[in-house]
Every structure is written in C-alpha cells, then in structure tokens.
Image (cartoon, rainbow, N blue to C red):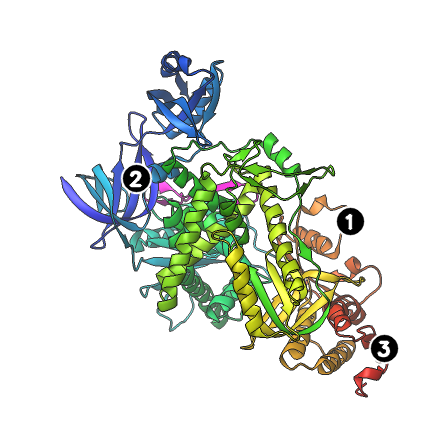
Amino acid sequence: MALIQFFPIDISYETNQEGRAAIQLFGRTVDGKKICVIDPSFKPYFYVIPYNKEQLRNLSERILNIKIERDNERYYVDEIKIETKNIFTKPVDLLKVFVNHPKAVNEIKKEVKLIKEVKDVRENDINFTKRYLIDKDILMLNLMEVEGDVVERNLNVEISIIANELKQVSQETFNNPRILAFDIETYTPEGRYPIEDKDPVIMISFYSNDGFRRVFTYKEFKTNHDYIKFVDSEYDLIQKFLETLEEYNPDFLVGYFTDGFDFPYLKARARKNNIRLMFNNSRIKITRKGQSSATKIKGLPHLDLLKFIRHIMSGSLRLDSYSLNSVAFELLKERKLDMNPQFIGKAFDEAGLELEKYCEYNLKDSELTLKIAEKILPNLEEIARLINTTIFDVCRMPYSGLVETYLMKRAKEFDEIFPNKPGKDMEAIRRMNSYQGAFIFNPIPGLHKNIVVFDFQSLYPSIIVAHNIDPSTLTNKDEGYKTPEILLETGEKIRHRFSSNAEGLIPSVIRDIITRRVRVKEMLKSDKLNPVLQARSYALKTLANSTYGYYAYFGARWYCRECAESITSFGRFYIQSLIERAQKEGFNVIYGDTDALFIALQDKTKEEALVFLEQVNRELPSLMELDLEDFYPRGIFVSKRGERGGAKKKYALISEDGRIKVRGFETIRRDWSTIAREVQKEVINIILIEDDPEKAYKYVFNIIKDVREKKIDLNKMIIQTVLKKGIDSYDLEGPHVIIAKKMRDQGIPVQTGSVISYIVTEGKGRVRDKAMLPDEASNYDADYYINNQIIPAVETIFDAIGYSASELLTGKKQTDLGSFF
C-alpha cells in the first residue's frame, strides 16, 4: 500500500474487462514524477422522477431488470437508490440509477423513458469525467493525496496506482508545469493555400519553458543552428512529432489554432502515411461539433490558446484580428518574423538559406505561443479551480459553459437536481424570443471637456442578488420584489415578482462570487503585482459578468426569459433614476448607456461629483455600487450617420494621464481598410491629445491628396471582412464573397468565420468586380478609398465638432479653418 501526494492535471477513464468504467487522474507527484491514479469506485448515474412517489419501489424493480447488448457492448443497471432531492428548492422523491458504463446512461435512459409511470429523467446528459470532478469536489491542479496499490499500466507515466482512498489535502497549487508549444509548416505552392491531400507537412517546431528547442524538417541544408534537426521523410517527421511528445512528456501541450489547423492537418497527413496518431497508448482524438473541433490527448491537456482568447479574453483585448501576430503584439509587444508563408514551398524545393529562415520563422511561432501561454495560464488555472473542471475544457468554453459548469458545481451543495439541456426544438423556440434591452440616453454630439464617468459595478449580477432573481423565486403572489414595467413585443405591459422568503440558487451563487471578488480586490490593494490574486480576480469577474447573459442563452439548463427581462427592467430603472437625479442636481448629462453615466462638469467641480457619487451609493441596495471610472479632460461623441441624434456606444475619451479610450469607432473593427483606420485613429489622437481640430482637418486633407497621387502603400488598402455564413448562402454577393469564391476555386479552405482580405483596384464596374486578392492587386481605386473608406471614417467626428468633412473632397476653403487649403 502506497501513500502519494500529487497534483491532478488531466482526467479520463478506462474500461475494464467486465465492461465497467474507472476514472483515470493524470498528474505529477510532489517530487516531479508523472502519475496516473485509477479510481474504480465511481459509477455513472442519472435520476428518474415518477408521477407518484408511491410508484418508486415498483419502478425501481422494473428499471433494475433493464439490460441491453449492442455492438458487442453490455449495458445494465448496477444499483438503484431512493433519494430526496430538490427541484427549484422544492423536495422531490426520486430514483438514483447507477449503470455500469458512461455509454450505458443514454442507452438505459431511452428504455426508462418508455415506462408510462416515469414523469422525467434528469442529469442523463452530463459528461462522466465532469460528473466525477463535481461530485468529488476535486480542484484540478490543487494538491491531492492517494492511498492505494501500485500497478503496471502502459500509460507513459512513472507511477500507476489504484486508489483505495483519494482526497484533496490542501490549497497548494501546481507550480512550474512543463509546457511544450508546437507549430507546423506545410508545403505551400505560390498563390495557393496548402491542401491536405496534396501538400505535405515539411517542418514542425517545439519550444518549451525549460530550454527545449527543436525544428524538425526533412530537406537537408547547411546550418549553424543546433536546434534544427533533419529526418528522412514526412513519415519520419510525423513519427518524430509523436516521439517528442512521449519523450518530453510535458504537463501541457499548447498551440495556436491547433484545433482548427495543425492537428486536423497532421491527422490527414498521418492517414496518408499510414501512421496512427497515438499517445499514452491511446488514439489522439479530434472531435467536431458544427464548425468547431477539439483535439483530445489522453493524459496530456492540449490547449488551443486561440479559443480562450477569442471566447473569453476578446472583450478586454478588443483586437481587430486574433491572429498570432496581433495577439502576440498586444500581450507581449513581440511579433512574428517577417516571412511570407506562401513562398515556403519554393524555399523547401531550393533547400538553401531561405529554408533556414523559415525554420527560424517556424520556431518563433512556437516561442510566441509558449510566451502567450505563460501569460494567460494563471487565468485558465484559476477558472478551472473555480468551476471544478479541467484546463482543457476551460480553454474551449464560451461564457455560457463557464457559468453552467459553476452552477452545476454549486447546485450540488443545495441538493438541487440540474435541469436537462434543451432539445433542438426547444432551442429553436427560445431563439425566437426577444425582450426589451438596456436603456440608452443618446449622447449629445460634440467635443466635450472636463468629463466624469460613473459606472455601476457589475450592475446585472448585483441586480440578480438584490432582487433575488431566480427561476425558483419567480412567483404569481403579490409579494417580494416587483419589477418595473416590462413592455412585451405584443405591446402589453407586465411586471414580474420574485419571492424574498428564501434566496434562490443563482442569486446565492452570485452573491458569493461578488463578495469573494471584493475580498480579492482589497488584497490586491496591498499586493498589486500578485499574479495569483490577479488571476483570481479575473476569474471571478469573468464568471460574475457572464451570468445575466446565461439566463437568456437558448441552450442554457437554467434558461429563464422572465428572469432575463426582469434584470434588464431593473437595469433601465437604475440608470434612468441616476440620470434624473444627476440632472435634478444640476449636472450636464451628455450620455447614459446600460450601466454608465457620462457628465460634462462645466461649472461643477470634481469634489461635487464625488459627493454626488457618495450620496447615490448610500441609497443603493446591498451589493449594488456606483463607481468612479475616471475623469477625462476631453471626449468626442458623434452623431448617427445622416442623423442629428447621437450615436450610442461610439465615443473617444482621453484620461488625465494621457490614455485614450475608444469605443465603437472603426479603429477597433477589421472590416475597414488599414488606411481608413489609421486616419481615424490619428484624427482622434490630434483632437484629444493636442486639442487641435484644425490640425486634424488639415492632416486628412493631405492624406486624401496622397491617396489621389498614389503615394500610399498598397498594403494599407487591404480590407478584411469575416465570412458570416456559407459562401453559397449569400443572396447579395459583396466583394468579400466574390473573393471567397475565388479562394475556394484556388483550393484555399474557406468556411464560415474565415477572414477574407481584398483590395479594390482600378477599373470599371461595381466594387465587387474590382476586388482582388492582396497578392494579385497591383494598384488601388483612389476614389473608392477616399469616398467609401477615409471620408466615412472621419465624417461624423468632424461633423460633431463643427467642421464639414465633405469639403475635404473638393479642397475648397472653409471660412473657419484659416487659409491652409
């Protein structure tokens, strides 16, 4: 009998000869050895709810006799218990049905649902390993202790042990994991994207956090780089990839878009070379769901960083592209090497100095991936601990997944049965539902000075807590919390009520999240650079701010339209009340949006603004708080294009320390040309930083002149547009659709979500007739870029501050601009 302490990193399960499933926890011991802990004690199960509790025993006997044999597999009921659980806080007697294998859950459930005495079946749609982590309350990456018998297993670990007892022993976390980043390069003929069936993988790079550096390729050339190693063929290259994983045996394998490109491409080429992609004596599995895929490696968490950055971090990064180059620059202030991938095929054929440079390029991609992983791994780890799941799952979860997993974890503490996920028909019905959104006080266009911005701290989460908004507290009785009026699509006005007798599950959970984050923020005040506290604050904030949207998400277990529309109704009430109060006290409100208030101080002082803030907070319900975001010397608010009213969510501010905050302008959108975004950004900078609109106006006039004279770099004319649906689904084909079709004809993979790049060139016809791929374009249509890119990008800004952007086209002198034209 051995007693071992270890940090769990990944989870899977195996099936024994009797057809039973046993959990496998992969991790590393405190002295650095790879370990697999096997727990055969946990059984998959689901719940059965009868119409009448008197039917429980008879129903139990019938279900116990269910046995199914299919595809050489035996599925049967192992054990049944009669238990009492809660459904929306109300106790219910039911059956807990244990089966022999995770796959048996769905098969047995089908038979159970045919029994007429069965009212409902619950929790039959939960992943076995997720169920284990939630039920056992295991925090991945936190120290555990196992007592059991050491056995032999072919799992690429140093210790395999069958657990007799397994427990979490402390909050000590796994530090200094071995991280291995990788990247592949494929043979790319000039002018064509690589095709899996035709073009081989020609090099693979690795970069670790403990000094391991490698680039493998199979075209030899002279080099002084000792990290470049040669193999004989693509077959050997793929085998070397698998050998490296086995030999280096990292704790995390990280990549960038590796779910979407690298692994699917490796799988296709492995099939071409009659190679099985295996690790830990198990097949590397690529699963697809809709347009997305995920690559699972048993015992080795594979983290595609792009997914976490796009799903979770995108709101804070606000990038116009989530390419490795853009993200690396944003997070690391580093860039990829300046090499064009389309010429790698030629370099490979010639096997000279250029191929060596592409090896450097390949290694740099892995290096950047590794550094990004080190930067964001603390956030991933903290979220994984917070919601009791694996870092593999967190990396791929959207906001709704984070919330749902955490609610499932916390529901266990309340003895609550989880609602099942909706079927496709119910999802379709929910998708059709809509409700009144947030209140917007339209901005007053112009260049405003001495602005103060207040915003409610986590407005929607705090509303959920303050008014006990939960499916279980929704009531028809005239009691508790009554919402403000809600306008339905039919024109009817209603109010919802929520009981105050007992706190609902979700308000209770959110209260705890908010309280914990307040404590963490207090700790950060005296320890600002603590990476663990920073990551914990990020995890709690991410989870809290995701909860409101979860109520309205069509695929949610705890979906509740009444809750969602009640939250927005209270949100409208609080922001409108705040605006009315500010105006009553003589403040000049220039904009109000969802949870934020913008005030131009004018004859008011900062001190008076802070007193106003303090007075408001004294009267708000528990946990609701209005914060001072910042004071801003200047801010631009613009009109809706072609209208007199202000444009919501579109403004630019400069703080007292010189930081510029931009919302809604094309500077943070990819579907404008680089020149348009650059011009708009520079105009905003000149107006806000230098407080010189005339200089900004003259700057744009000179840019237009340079565009007409073709002095602007062709690359700055590239326009990028996301393909939002299938190529053949468009009724009206814009230029990006025409280009997408051209790419498809050239063998370049194009699908929904692909970013399409093109340049509008000179010539006759419609814009789409003049659009060309950047590599094929030799000129640009100056009039198009002036009239449809540059002018629209700055027109509303100049209109808001009293300048006529249209005169930039003619160069006519304007009386209030001086004589610079």
Residue 283 showing in the rendered view: yes
Q: In 3D space, how far apart are the residues under numbered discs 2 and 1 (Cα atoms)?
A: 53 Å
Amino acid found under the numbered disc labelled 3? Thr
Q: Which mark is residue 169?
A: none
Residue beneath disc 1: 732
Q: Identify the residue at horizontal 36%, vertical 38% (top origin).
A: 413
Q: Secondary structure at mark 3?
A: helix
Q: Quadrant of the C terminus?
A: bottom right
Residue beneath disc 3: 810
Residue beneath disc 2: 24
Residue 742: x %, y % from top left: 70, 54
Amino acid found under the numbered disc labelled 1? Leu
Residue 597 higher or lower than 161, as above or below: below
Question: To which quarter of the image does residue 252 belong?
Answer: bottom left
Residue 650 higher or lower than 447, as above or below: above
Amino acid found under the numbered disc labelled 2? Gln
Magenta highlight range: 273-292
Q: In 3D space, how far apart are the residues under numbered discs 2 and 3 (Cα atoms)?
A: 73 Å
